[in-house]
Image (spheres, rainbow, N blue to C red):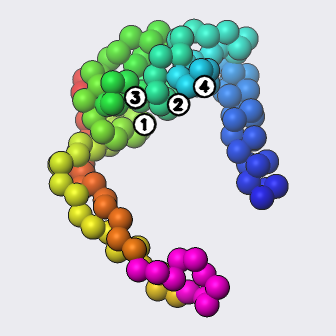
Amino acid sequence: MVKKILTIACIIIVLPVVFAILNMRAFVHRHENCGYIDKSGEFVIEPQFSRAGYFSEGLAAVHVGGKYGYIDKTGEMKIKPRYDIAISFHEGLAEVGMSTGKVEAEDTTPRITSANSEDASDQKRDRTIYRWGVIDKSG
């Protein structure tokens, strides 16, 4: 448990500091929204996104209005939010996913259990099916 807490603390505290020191923008949460700070800790993009990713190749995936899009380092939306899942850019391309609207039942029945396991009951969980694609920086 202590190890988990230290890991989470490291992610929350250390990563933004490292990005700030490297003169990059780091995303931070404030009042349930995400924004970006510069190396001095000042907001350069005010918290307005429900989720946000790190900048990669000048763009960052942000979640707004229930969909993901991409902003540049000034906060301008470069690729309109229309994706259900968005991955960072790498070599000019990014993976994106859009829900097909279909759901399948995922079998979560444990394969190996102990007599004391709480997971010993049969369970089914719905899983959304996505169509995956690759986009360039024009979307």
The secondary element bearing badge 3 is classed as strand
Q: CA distance from mark 3 to mark 4?
A: 13 Å
The residue at which mark 4 appears reads as 29
Q: CA distance from mark 4 to mark 2?
A: 13 Å
| Residue interval drawn in magenta | 113-122
The residue at which mark 3 appears reads as 63
Disc 2, disc 1: CB below 8 Å?
yes
Mark 1 is surrounded, within 10 Å at the Cα level, by few (under 14), some (14 to 19) or many (20 or more) other residues, namely: some
Closer to the N terminus: mark 3 or mark 4? 4
Amino acid type at mark 1: Ser
Closer to the N terminus: mark 4 or mark 1? 4
Answer left or right for 131 relative to 40: left
> For this rendering, which residue is in front, 86 or 126?
126
The secondary element bearing badge 1 is classed as loop
Q: CA distance from mark 1 to mark 3?
A: 13 Å
Amino acid type at mark 4: His
